[in-house]
Amino acid sequence: MLAGMSEHKATIKWQQAGGDFAKGRYSREHTWSFDGGMTVAASSSPAAVPVPLSNPANIDPEEAFVASLSSCHMLTYLYLCWREGIQVQTYDDEAVGVMTKNERGVSWVSTVFLNPRVVYAGTAPSHDDEVRLHHAAHQGCFISNSVKTDIQIKLGGDT
C-alpha cells in the first residue's frame, strides 16, 4: 500500500438457507462484518425484493449508502466547526436517497438529500457561515468525493 493510503474492509457473508435458488426464491438476508468486530444484519431492500425473501428489519445497501453520505458529511462538518471554535451541541439529519433510472434504464441512487439540524452551544454561526461550512464539509467528505450521486444539503429555511 502507498504511503498516506488507508484500507477500509467489510466482510459480507451469505449462505443458502432454504428456498429454491434455481427459481430465485431464496433469502437475501446476509451479514456485514467490520474490522472492529461489529456484525450487522443486512438484506436486500423490500422495494427491490419482496418480503419474505428480504427482511425489512435489516439494513439494505441503499439505506447504508445514504447513511454513509450523511455520516461522512456530519463528521466533516463537526471537524470544521471545531477548527473554527464553533461549539456544536447536537446534529441530526434525516437523510433521504431517491432512486431513479439512468439513461440505460438501470436503477440508481441519483440524489441524496441531507437535512441537517444543528444546535449550537454558545453563539451560533450566521446563516451564511453555516452555508459556507456545510459547503466545505461537502467538498471535504471522503464519501461524497467518491460517488457521482447528486448530494443536496437543505438547511432550515432553505427551499
Image (cartoon, helix red, strand yellow):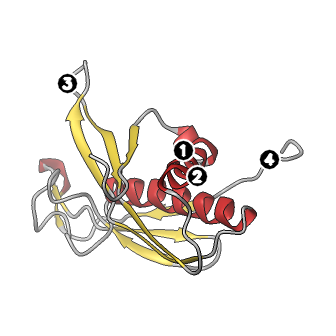
What residue sits right under mark 4 in the picture?
5
Residue 76, horizontal then vertical, whole percent: 62, 58
Q: Residue 13 carries which label?
A: none
Q: 121 or 126: nearer the eye?
A: 126
Separation of disc 3 and disc 4 at Cα? Answer: 35 Å
Mark 1 / mark 3, whichever is N-terminal: 3
Q: Residue 133 carries which label?
A: 2
Q: Which of marks 2 and 4 is in front?
A: 2
Separation of disc 1 and disc 3 at Cα? Answer: 31 Å
What residue sits right under mark 1 in the picture?
135
Disc 2, SS: helix
Residue 71 shown left or right of residue 101 in the figure: right
Separation of disc 2 and disc 4 at Cα? Answer: 26 Å
Q: Which amino acid does label 3 sit on?
A: Gly
Disc 1, SS: helix
Q: Nearer the viewer, mark 3 or mark 2?
A: 2
Residue 159, horizontal then vertical, whole percent: 26, 46
Q: Are marks 2 and 1 in contact (CB under 8 Å)?
A: yes
Q: Which mark is residue 105?
A: 3
Mark 3 / mark 2, whichever is N-terminal: 3
